[in-house]
Amino acid sequence: MEPDDEALREVAAAVARAQPPQRRGISYSQPLSRDAASARRAALRNHSLDDDHILPASHSLNYVHHDPSAGVPNPGGGGYQPPLPPHGHQPQHHHHPSASYSTGSRRSVGGASDGSMTLERAMSEYGGGHGTLPEYVGAGGGKGIFRVPLRAAMHPARPPPLEVRPHPLRETQAGSFLRTLAAEPERRQLWAGAESGIRVWALDEVFAGWGAGARRGDEESAPFREGMPAPPALCVAVDRANRLLWTGHKDGRIRSWRMDLDAAATAPAPPPGGAGDGGGSVGGSNHGGPSNAPVFKEALTWQAYGRTPVLSMVVTSYGEIWSGSEGGVIKAWPYDAIAKSLSLSPEERHMAALLVERAYIDLRNHCTVGNVCSLPASDVKHMLADYSRAKVWTVTSMTFAIWDARTRELLKVFGMDGQVESARLETPVMPEQPIEEEVKVKPSKKDKSQGSLNFFQKSRNALIGAADAVRRVATKGTFVEDNRRTGAVAQAMDGTIWSGCTNGSIILWDGNGNRVQEFQHHTSSVQCIKALGERVWAGYASGIVQVMDVEGNLLAGWTGHSCPVIRMAIGGSYIYTLAHHGGIRGWPLTSPGPLDDILRTELTNKELSYTRMEKINIMVGSWNVAQGKASAESLKSWLGSVSSDVGLVVVGLQEVEMGAGFLAISAAKETVGLEGSANGQWWIDNIGKALDEGTSFHRVGSRQLAALLIAAWARKSLKPYVGDVEAAAVPCGFGRAIGNKGGVGLRIRVYDRKMCFVSNHFAAHLEAVSRRNADFDHIYRTMSFNKPHGSTASATSVQLHRGVNVNGNQVDEVRPDLAEADMIVFLGDFNYRLYGITYDEARDMVSQRSFDWLREKDQLRAEMKAGKVFQGMREGLIKFPPTYKFQKHAPGLGGYDSGEKKRIPAWCDRVLYRDSRPISVADCSLECPVVASITSYVACMDVTESDHKPVRCTFSVDIARVDELIRRQEYGEIIETNEKVRSMLEESSFVPDTTVSTSEIILENQENIVFRITNKCETSKAAFEITCEGQSSKKEDATKSEILPRASFGFPLWLEVQPAVGLIKPGETAEITIHHEDFYTQEEFVDGIPQNWWCEDTRDKECVLTVNIRGSTSTETKSHAISIRHRCPATSAPPPIISNPLSSSAAPPINALASEGPPSKRSSKKRESNHHKREQREQQQQDYAQFGSSEVHDLCRMRCP
């Protein structure tokens, strides 16, 4: 039934062409577990199961030529193919709808050495004996976008990864998605920040298994420990000196977690969860660790921001913690307050938190003078500590700011183009309202007014951000810059700063914020960057991982994950990547290289040990309901009668509701992300009742586009293995905008395999064959189930994840989402008719059940034979009468349309599919992970509520998958036992031999002292990093105090070391400059306002510097120690304490950075500044010369109230 064409044209003209936002399918599924009882396969294969596609440079499939008269297809056209019996004539077993079993030996199906088979033999051997139907295969498959995706147990196009945490089902991760990653190489720990708190992996135990008690979705993950539940962790910073992990959270708090897990694990494990608890564990425990392992508590926590999250955080070169939040707010937390709080006992936690909480320095206010500030009021999403020059970079989406880490002075603000940003008027900011914990009272009118002020403050920030965009447009005349935002920032070991953009480009900056170069090796958004030695890694939204040298030259690239790579961390000999879906993989730092080849070969040889085979039955039904509703008896006849034997049910409906008004409203709703209708919900509810939803089946997803609807149900026993349900819709009605024609689809992950089901309604009328072909092609090419992060493309257009080869060139071929599925099922009212036949002839042939003759007149079969539509797809042998067109409520074959139009009966309603078989006959294996056969293909002729008859197709599907736990254990065994691998790993841990010119430096009235680091290796660059193990002071009794480190082994404020990080070429020498301050000024802040300041005496202080040397393929280090002692004449004395200084006496901050010079030279501007400071100190010393040395020390330790 079709609506009035003129009315639809008017609707199409009125509907805006805005594309709808992408939505995910509704999902209720549970996690995946492995079948520990599966037996080993005897055959060894080298392809398989990965969820990521492989794009070789060229690939073609050559079909064997057969005699068309024998019923077997030739390369130029379609024809019948015998179905594949499960696993090559294995004995039939009584499997559960989601049974698991292991394979036996591989053998050729059919017994013919040349692979040929007649239709008669196929029907006799496989059509009856094994309960499967012969299938017709369309021409044109095996090439281009219609080529089946290639799979491999060990992906041939990337290094063999260490699967720390295999891709979990999204439905098992609700409230616990991983969002950030950090590694501590010395303690061999990998930390992840999740939406539910913190978890940590001990890398020495990464090859072990859980036993019992694993969290749902983490059954195959390496064992981990979890912290106490906490709000989502958005950023992390590692503090190796204090053995702490600092985390910033969505609730505005900063928390610390002790890396000594045994000492921190003071809380008992959570109680076991029930068997039906979706958030529980397989073995009963509710948390992520073993059932008897306690979780660990946080160490120190405080409220950093009142009502905004902690978006970014960093530990500076001087051990301070800086954090960024919304609206451009930046706070610094002095280490003295942190150290004092950490020294307090657990009983004094509240006092410790209050001490740190009120000691912050508001850097935005600190650099605002006269309501003028150079910083934009944009969210501070990234922070970077420049350890080479003791600076801090704070980064918004469009701007950069550089700060002096020691003085906290704002040095420069500039945009992505490198141009300096001018100062702007700063609206006064209302002070943040602290959040009181564990106290819930009814808000007063005053509290409500403060909440309103907070709302207006956020609105102001949003308006300022919009004004910034308008200003940029006014200066540049385009919005192109808005598509080019900063998505990642990192420092390479040579001191350059790398920033990644959403358009895929990478910008290199020097330490002063000057652009060095810009390059682009990929078109997808840069999500993360990590550096070690002379290598830099970048992760993209397309899942690509690239390796470059410090000059930006591309060394290699591969598909790391099937979704965005959002974080990276380096530990040991691996770089770990965190994908958006929560999976974590480790890649050898030497990759690509000879180690990869050995690992790939060895793991392929062990393939039989980690291969698992699963079997399920899937029922697919399609019905054009002609805007009607069905009785319970009709639904039971169509679906309920056979649903007891299947594990997955997918139903597609067409013409759920029509009419110009409804279609117009639906199109408008789609543009704002809304879908569904009352009729659509009625159908979903009543089909669920027919399937006994809630008891036998659970609905896992649905999608409606105007008149089109698709929904899926999984049997309760199969539900734990079904998930990652995503939905998509492609309108094909007038102007490709109206949903009366088109397709709606669901992509479902079943036993780690991607299956796509698409319900379609193509163009009507006998003569519209080319339009129907075009509808299929449009849906196949443009249906997109997920929108890549960082992409600005429309949701209904194909999101192109262009691959790159090692030379950085893009692969020409673009693979649609449907092309990457392991199995595709197209169902619906395709509207292909019978041609070259009259109405009366068709009726006669139907009454005589001469379906063989009618099939020769089928438009769809002719188009498939010509390779014009459904290329390479399969359909079971049709043995039922044409399903269109009938008079409603007219039973039997006499109900065909006999009205004025007398539409010729036709098989409009069809079900076609494509599985993983690259050739017509193949066994299910890791190279061909999904093999299906049709066991039933019928039409329900007794259903009379529509002018179409519903059809039903049942598949028997064999699925091959990888047991990731077993494969990871095999990986570990290879690492431990293979001599070649062990030798290569030892070579990768090579640290270049270096010498340091001195082991002791005494500072006496000298401004600069230079020492040298020499790389004696003639082949490799040496990366160095200088840290401070701590400082001690001389007490009054001439003894030394204990050497205490600052956070992350930061330098004391009286010492400057430049550069503290760098690369030394083979045979060359780096000069390191040591500078000291005789007196340095310290300030005490309370609630961001300076209260006191004093001059600190640095005489008779001592610190120990450590020069850490490492290579580029391991975090192994060699260290050199340098003792730094500072001695001054006894006559020197610092000035006394001064309380309550005058505020805001300085001019607005300016861009104070000059171009960089050699490390051993200081700029003339700084020399003048130091000379002026010395004159001030000498004058102060003369004024307070009456104080003795001991009195001076007493003054230095005083604090003003």
Image: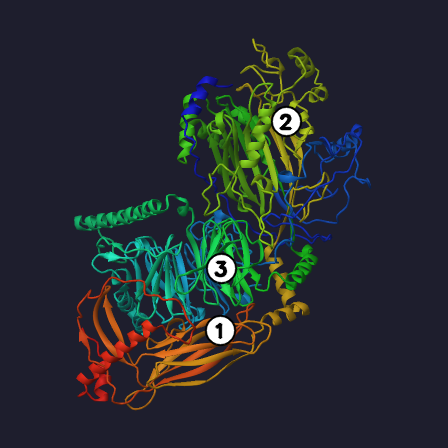
Q: Is residue 952 above or below residue 1024?
A: above
Instruction: Give amino acid for label 2.
Output: Val
Residue wearing tag 1: 1024
Q: Write the residue at 44% across / 77% down.
A: 1072
- The 10 Å Cα crowd at callout 1, few under 14, some 14 to 19, many 20 or more, is many
- The 10 Å Cα crowd at callout 3, few under 14, some 14 to 19, many 20 or more, is many
Query: Mark 3 near mark 2, Cβ–Cβ under 8 Å?
Result: no
Q: Is residue 906 visible?
A: yes
User: How far apart are labels 3 and 2 at the CA level?
Assistant: 52 Å
Instruction: Give amino acid for label 3.
Output: Met
Q: Is residue 210 visible?
A: no
User: In x, y percent, where is residue 840?
Assistant: 66, 11
Q: Secondary structure at mark 2?
A: strand
User: In x, y percent, where is residue 52?
Assistant: 58, 49
Residue wearing tag 2: 938
Mark toward the start of the polypeptide (1 vs 2)? 2
Q: Write the residue at 68% across / 16% down.
A: 836
Disc assigned to residue 990:
none
